[in-house]
Amino acid sequence: MKEIALAGGCFWGVDEFFSRKEGVLSTKSGYSNGQVDNPTYEEVCTGKTGHAETVLVQYDESRISLETILEKFFKVIDPTSLNRQGNDIGTQYRTGIYYIDTKDKETIDNFIEQKQPRYSSPIVVEVEPLRNFFDAEEYHQDYLKKNPRGYCHIDLSID
């Protein structure tokens, strides 16, 4: 089992999108790479904690590669949009790829380098080690499974 943490705006859609992918074992919504331990949603929304809404993705590397996960991720985010995805604006909605395994950094850097020529603006996706991850409140977990008509800024039908 491998893990990667992905920040792509509101975590509800990113969580649901990846939970549907073959080879993904589990997803969990949370707050990552901020300065406050165990922040609440309300605290993160102020933009003062430094956290990004993030989805921790556990996957079976023999069934889905990190490169494939990154390809799918880039289909549902605008990698050139700073601190905004869809209608969500603020540093908590920034895009990021937060790695746990240091060996993944080279794969991520190469992926972004290969993608950059396809965009007229710079790719602004953060690439950093996952320094911390705090589970979001229970009502955020599997939010779109519990609330199928809930807000989602991404097209969940994209493969």
Image (cartoon, grey):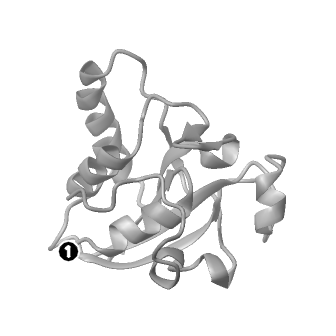
Position in image of residue 65 (x %, y %): 20, 61
- Residue position marked by numbered label 1 in the rendering: 22
Q: Which residue: 73% across, 53% down?
A: 34
Q: Vertical placement of 71 versus 18: above or below?
A: above
Q: For the C terminus, which image quadrant?
A: bottom left
Q: Where is residue 87 in the image (x, y as percent from the top left)?
A: 58, 43
Quadrant in which residue 143 is drawn: bottom right
In this picture, residue 143 sits left or right of residue 63: right
For the N terminus, the image quarter is: bottom left
Out of 4 and 141, give the one closest to the viewer.
Answer: 141
Residue 68 in view of the camera = yes
Q: In this view, does 152 lie to the left or right of 138?
A: left
Q: Which residue is drawn at 23% across and 29% down?
A: 114
Numbered marks: total = 1
Q: In which quarter of the image is residue 30?
A: bottom right
| Residue 2 seen in the figure | no
At mark 1, the secondary structure is: loop
- Please report the residue visible at 46 percent of the width from the left and 62 percent of the height from the top: 13
The location of residue 142, given as percent across then percent down, is 50, 80
Three-letter amino acid code of the residue under disc 1: Glu
Q: Position of residue 128 (x, y in %)?
A: 52, 45
